[in-house]
Amino acid sequence: MIKATAYAGAAVIAALYGAPGFANADTITDYEVINAPAMKAAKAPRAVLTEITQTSNYTVAVGDYGVVLYREPGQSDWQQADMPTSVLFTSVDFVDADHGWAAGHHGVIAATNDGGKTWQLQLDGFEFTELQKAHFQIVVDELTEELEQLDGSNVEREDELAFELDNATYLLDMAFVAEEEGPTKPFLDIRAVNRDVIFAVGAYGTLVRSRDGGENWEILDERLANLDGFHLNALTSDEQYVYIAGEGGQIFRSADMGDSWDLLDSPYYGSFFGLHIDTQNRLWVAGLRGNIFVSDDQGDSFNQIKLPDNVNINSVVDAPSGGVYLVGNAGVIGWVDAAGNIKQMTHSSGAALTDLVAHGDGRLTVVGQRGVLEITDFESSAQTQE
């Protein structure tokens, strides 16, 4: 899924807020978007939408201006949810038909307990900055105390602590910079492992976890071997592991619900945007320039998959008939079936596509730069890779 939506330009703004009822709407500036409820718009399905998911009750899509759409199975019309913020949402995930979480810009995380019709803020950028300051101050104090207690007999450990202290001090300094500049850090993906444990990742190495359904959040940045502060773009999990992928080809894996993380050997050193575990428990990771890889051993090794067009791949999702769909820039949708055969179609819009849900009757509902797109003829439009 695309995590930077620079294409949300004037044309999309006009399409959404040019609708009746918004002609005299006041412009929302600076960080007012955090607490400004999303305005209802007849043309909301044409807004930039970043991610879409499906439960037994609804199909739910999120995107710019705090837009959250939901639709009942078998229906064509979308409803716009009540959302108490107008930030750009980048990700949405449900743990069951009722309970879901959405993450977005300005450090915002929101939750729903009615399937996506109404939402409540659980975290915003101001609270997030306070969490960072408090957390990294504790880390700095603990490392300083431990370093001062050493007597020079373990030089290797002292060097490790000094390195960790430098990193923690830098992160603390950045938290104070964020306090001065305002809550600019975006969350880029969210994953609900269960009703209690939720992870969110974001720009500059941001990693947070809740263990009480989002009531409280803790900072985990320093637990990753990410000293350059690369953006963390994607999350997924299975019964054994939680995974993170991001810039610089980074792929992290945790076997203890985020307490510790291993940095895996990456098959590629560019950015990854999509991360998915399919019905065969294979790990998929995809990103820049059509770089797509799949692992049969939980990320210990990878095999490369190639679509005909080498465009950025933003999301990987299960296909009902087997295999996975992949969506990307320039209107590209690929299908790798259960036997490994590859087909690709290019949507006539040529738009950047960020995510999709696949329905049992073969229809695809795709979201991205042009809002919601419905595809009914993938099989007839796709070409098989030779």
Image: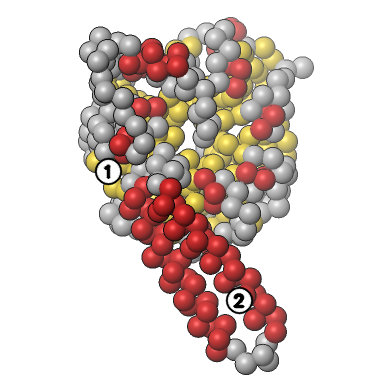
Q: Mark 2 to mark 1: distance in Å?
A: 37 Å
What's the residue at 49%, 72% (across, down)?
Answer: 140
User: Can you give x and y, in whole percent of width and height, for residue 62 in the image?
Assistant: 38, 29
**Viewer-closest of 125 and 322:** 125
Looking at this view, name the residue that lies furthest to the right.
Answer: 386
User: Can you give x and y, in whole percent of width and height, for residue 229 in the image?
Assistant: 59, 52
Residue type marked 1: Leu
When the figure is inspected, residue 245 is found, relative to residue 139, above or below; the finding is: above
Number of marks in picture: 2
Could one spot residue 75 in this view of the protein?
no
What's the residue at 60%, 76% (across, down)?
Answer: 161
Residue type marked 2: Leu
Asked which quadrant contains residue 223, the reply is: bottom right
Image-based side of 370 in relation to 19, left or right: right
User: Can you give x and y, in whole percent of width and height, for residue 29 in the image?
Assistant: 34, 32
Image-based side of 382 in relation to 79, left or right: right
The circle on residue 121 is 1
When the figure is inspected, residue 81 is found, relative to residue 212, above or below; the finding is: above
Q: Are marks 2 and 1 in contact (CB under 8 Å)?
A: no
Image-based side of 144 in relation to 194, left or right: right
Asked which quadrant contains residue 39, the reply is: top left
The circle on residue 339 is none
What's the residue at 30%, 36% (across, down)?
Answer: 32
**Viewer-closest of 371 and 165:** 165
User: Can you give x and y, in whole percent of width and height, for residue 54 in the image?
Assistant: 38, 29
**Viewer-closest of 81 and 376:** 81
Q: Quadrant of the C terminus?
A: top right
What's the residue at 41%, 52% (across, down)?
Answer: 180
What residue would you read off at disc 2? 161
